[in-house]
Amino acid sequence: MEHSHHHSSNDTNRNKGNAKKMDMKPMDHSQHDMSHAGYGSNPKHGEIGHNHSAMIEDFKRRFYVSLGLTIPILVLSDMIQHWLGFQLEFMGRKYLLLALSTVLFWYGGKPFLEGCMDELKSRRPGMMTLIAMAITIAFVYSVATVFGFQGMDFFWELATLIVIMLLGHWLEMRSVANASKALELLVQMIPAEAHVMHGEMIHDMPLKEVKPDFRILVRPGEKIPVDGTVLKGESYLNESMLTGESAPVLKQVGTKVIAGALNGNGSLEIKVEQTGEGTYLAKVIQMVQDAQNTKSNTQRLADRAAFWLTIVALVMGFGTLTAWLLIGQSWAYAVERMVTVMVISCPHALGLAIPLVVAISTSLAAKNGLLIRNRTAFENARKISMLIFDKTGTLTTGIFGVTRRGSFLPNLTKNDLLAITAALEQNSEHPIATGIITEAKAQNISIPHVEDFQAITGKGVSGKVGGKNVLVVSPGYLRENNLNIPEGAVADASETVVFVLIDNQLAGFIALADQIRESSAEAIQILKSQGIKTFMLTGDNQKVAETVSEKLGMTGYIAEVLPHQKLEKIKEQQQKGEFVAMTGDGVNDAPALAQADVGIAIGSGTDVAAETADIILVNSDPKDVASLIQFGRATHKKMIQNLIWATAYNTITLPLATGFIPGIVISPAIGAVFMSLSTIIVAVNAQTLRFK
């Protein structure tokens, strides 16, 4: 029953300066298949349909109110009094019971009755129809007994049925997260205003009024509001949220900048080229939308089982009634048999079979740092044949750190070398400088004073430390000045190496790299042992990709991939018949995460990636990906066991309920006990998941 919940992203966008410009359409959110949440996009409860959390609150409220009503109903019921061996008889007891049950039926049963109407309108009777039928028949039959119809009322059964069903739905819906946040978060990355320059005057203007060819100013620490070209100034921009590239990128006159990137500590004057829908970020948003909307919707096994169970139950229920009446039995007897069939076949157990496993696995997973947002994908984790990892921030930490240091002078220790280099680098904002300063602090090295500091554009920095002239330069500087690069200084392509010259003499080198996470190699080994192919997808160059993928022992790598190409690469693999999981962070991975059969976001990344992912790993540990697959398998197994039990139970008890098997007559109350027992078995089996 594909209940698509339309969450409009418009409300949140209303105040965002550029949201109108971007014309965000409310999404269909891959038609969140709520197994049987029955609360579709029905306008009758539109006030709930638009807002996912309001729906969850609604079910929660109905559950607690119904629970409150159920307690007195149980106390007042003949059957329960008989079982517990007490008697509570007073004037109008039956009418009080009727009044409480009527409120419960219409208030607690409302979602099921409305869900049933939706299903019948779409000609797809299922779980909702069956629940609605059972509670309606139990209610009507019980009302009749109050007004003189021969038989025992059924109110306690009606009450427990509604309460258990509401609980199941509430638990299930809580575990389905709201997909519309993805777009809100992406939109929030663009500021609402821009500082527009008129000559030397600066004027703040709403972004939607900014036109191409305007000149705007971006101050240090601000986000870039548009796509454009730098006219004046230079600064390092952090584009990692957009491009996945770990190192901040130097932007100088003539270079392009993209909306959403974070400015470092230089001011930039930018010529506007694209705003709103034309920006790179808006295109990423559109891709996320498309990928989310076209995502396949795994049809629930439980739905199918419930559909057939509904048909069988309805046919058998009315068939039983007709047959007994034709044989010449009384109405009381015939209705009792029919109600027994309806109650026994009502999918108490089937209704809980999936939501309970979902609730338990979701909470267990959350405790272990796995946030499940799309359980279809989580259950499908067992099918994964290929895992594609984004490199930066996933397999690596995304932070430039010192990997090696080497001194070429006998009286210069590695720590002295680091201290001198740090002295020069403390004036720079470059990620390499940051990495060197961080290392010096980590080693508790005191940083000496520097004089005559100068930046040599594109080559490095120079200055005087302790009366000596010091240069910190790139390998390119050595080549230009015909200085030999010593053996072993440049070891592998994934490193960036800087050289230190003291009084024009080559003194040493410091190598930095985006550091590989400690657990990456182990994760790749575990996945390999499970027969899963592992690929690395990165915007980095061929050499870096090759080095990292070989170090980790991966199946292969795809380098120099632009964000929109990542999605294409995943499609290519899917067309080859691979069941692809993608692990990444950053907005640039969002479309790819949405396209993959299973999208897994690493927690240290951006919120946006997390919002388009099916599963979020809170701890940025690639090993969790392997655990996730194993846990997904265990969860799916539990669901199948529960479904088999719930349907097998019906197959056996339904014929008994009809009363046609000689010597066996089950009363509706005993039928209800059977049903409760079945539910308990399903619940206990779901709990065993905790020991996985």
Image (cartoon, rainbow, N blue to C red):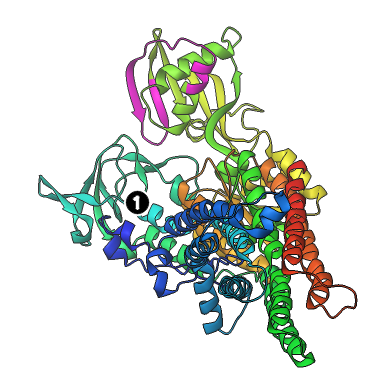
Membership of 446 in magenta stretch: yes
Quarter that holds the C terminus: top right
Farthest residue to the front: give it.
91
Percent position (x, y) of residue 228?
A: 30, 55
The residue depicted at 57 percent of the width and 70 percent of the height is 146
In the displayed structure image, the side of residue 562 where residue 550 appears, left or right: right
Q: Quadrant of residue 344?
A: bottom right
Foreground residue among 317 and 329: 329
Q: Secondary structure at mark 1?
A: helix
> Which of the two residues, 261 or 105, is positioned nearer the viewer here?
105
> Visible in this render: residue 505?
no
The answer to whether residue 244 of the structure is visible from this angle is yes
Residue kind at label 1, given as amino acid type: Gln
Q: Is residue 13 above or below residue 506?
A: below
Q: Which residue is mark 1?
A: 188
**How far across and how far down the image is residue 9, in percent?**
37, 61
| Image location of residue 386, percent across then percent down | 71, 58
* Magenta residue check for 207: no
The residue closer to the viewer here, 533 or 488, is 533
- Residue, far right: 662
Q: Which residues are magenta?
A: 438-462
The quadrant where residue 285 appears: bottom left
Q: How many marks?
A: 1
- Disc 1 crowd, CA 10 A, few/some/many (<14, 14-19, 20+): some
Viewport quadrant of the N terminus: bottom right
**Residue in the image at 27% along x and 64% along y:** 20
Residue at x-position 59% and y-position 21%: 405
Residue at 36% x, 23% y: name it. Answer: 427
Where residue 132 sits in the image (x, y, percent)?
58, 73
Note whether 498 is above or below 180 in the view shown.
above
